[in-house]
Image (cartoon, helix red, strand yellow):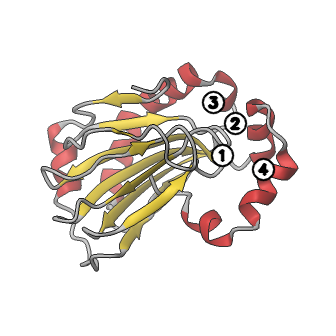
Amino acid sequence: MKKNIHIIDNFFDNETFSRLAELKLDDVKANAVKVYHNKVFKDETNLSCIDENLIKKIHQNYHSKLFRLLQEISMEKSKIYDYSDLTIIKTGKDYKFPIHDDTPNKLLSGVIYLYPTNNSGTIFYKNKKGDEKEMIEWKQNRGVFFSRTERETWHSYEGDGISNRVALVYNLMTNNIKKVFEIEGRNYFLGNLRWKLNPYLYRYLNFYI
């Protein structure tokens, strides 16, 4: 297993997991995805498919657990946390997302697999070319977490060609992009320009994992 990838089985309690797995979502085409953003700020929530009570319960019961994990991985990044993004991703059975290393506003990247019982998990690589492929096995209610590093934490995901894939992406986020590059020891101008020059990736990579 690659270092700094944290796997937590049975992440949610049974009631919370069941409520998430029973969410009513729109149909998705085989080669497409549906995205449902739900954000939690200090004093407000911005919701789509998850009701406010459930979002608040998740935040109250699990945020501190993830924040401690972020502190363990990078204490400096934990100091610039601004909000949480809890996004339901419904993936068509034939959809494939390209290899990427996540946008710099994601301090802690996480995914909890919801349903079906079997599908494909998150795939990690040595580089953008896809060398040394390693897949985290899909298991319902399994959480997979890591903190991105510019041009290092290469990963992707895809459907298994049989069933649609539904997961909750749970990210701890920041608005202080410049500080992220400083912490990672990378060039802010070049790194930020890299994302800005690719508007498709900059728009969509905030939530995919």
Q: Which residue is mark 1?
A: 174
Q: Which mark is residue 29?
A: none
Disc 2 to disc 3: CB gap under 8 Å: yes
Disc 2 to disc 1: CB gap under 8 Å: yes
Q: Earlier in the sequence, mark 2 or mark 1?
A: 2
| Label 2 packing within 10 angstroms: few (<14), some (14-19), many (20+) | some
Q: Quadrant of residue 167?
A: bottom left
Q: Work out whether residue 50 or residue 186 is closer to the camera in this orientation and state it.
A: 186
Q: Secondary structure at mark 1?
A: loop
Taking the image as shown, residue 109 lies to the left or right of residue 25, namely: right
Q: Secondary structure at mark 4?
A: helix
Taking the image as shown, residue 44 lies to the left or right of residue 1, namely: right
Q: Which residue is mark 2?
A: 80
Three-letter amino acid code at the position of disc 2: Ile
Q: CA distance from mark 3 to mark 4?
A: 20 Å
Disc 3 to disc 4: CB gap under 8 Å: no
Q: Which residue is mark 3?
A: 78
Q: Which residue is mark 4?
A: 191
Taking the image as shown, residue 38 lies to the left or right of residue 15, namely: right
Q: Residue furthest top?
A: 72
Q: Residue at x 33, y 44 (%)?
A: 57
